[in-house]
Image: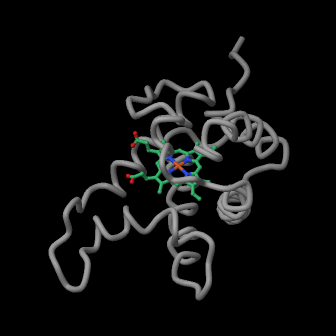
Amino acid sequence: EEPAPTLYDRLGKTEGIAKIVDGLIANVGAETQKPGTLMLRSHKPMLDAVNGVNGGAPTDPTRLTRLRNNFIDQLGEATGGPLKYKGMNMITAHTGMKITHNEFAVWREQLEASLVSNQVADADKVALYAIIDKMHGDVVNR
Ligand code: HEM
């Protein structure tokens, strides 16, 4: 008998998780362009490194790609897939950003919009949010 599909399988394996992460990144990127947005503050150092400042050369053009690939690995591992997260732990990755609960909530709305556009089933969203929300304390107020 076949083993029950894991959350990793139900999300569409690495390809499905990559689409979710790319949707999140696109949504957060669009959010950082809005006037008065909460999301620019925490993301500005990374965006400056990727885009360069005042027409200057980027100092770290692959920084966002590394975050993307690390996030895919992290979710691919945490949902029961064969991927292995090799990035920083969540406390270290977010220390110094002083992310507020409110900023976390906006980021979570960007994730929600990606889950909706990728047609993730409600039960799978609940399972994914259980993973995400467990990390709230490691990400917020660091
Ligand atoms: C549970 C929720 C979250 C998870 C799972 C998560 C995951 C990650 C991961 C895997 C990295 C890359 C670490 C590395 O490359 O070693 C990262 C970096 C980052 N996170 Fe998060 N994150 C979360 C919430 C947030 C929130 C709410 C914000 C801001 C509103 C945020 C902003 C950032 C930024 C700006 C970086 C890039 C660091 C840099 O390269 O400068 N994260 N996050």
Q: Residue furthest left?
A: 57
Q: Residue furthest top?
A: 1
Of the pair 99 and 51, the residue shown nearer to us: 99
State the image quarter where residue 142 is shown.
top right
Q: Residue 137 appears at what percent x and percent y?
A: 69, 37
Q: 118 or 104: nearer the eye?
A: 104
Color theme of the render? one colour
Identify whether 2 is placed above or below 58: above
How far across and how far down the image is residue 1, in percent?
72, 11
Q: Residue at x 79, y 49 (%)?
A: 121
Q: Nearer the viewer, residue 104 or 13?
A: 104
Q: Is residue 56 above or below residue 142?
A: below
Q: Is residue 67 left or right of residue 108?
A: left
Q: Position of residue 36 (x, y in %)?
A: 62, 84
**Residue at 68% of width from left, 27% of height from top?**
6
Q: Left or right: 39 with respect to 51?
A: right
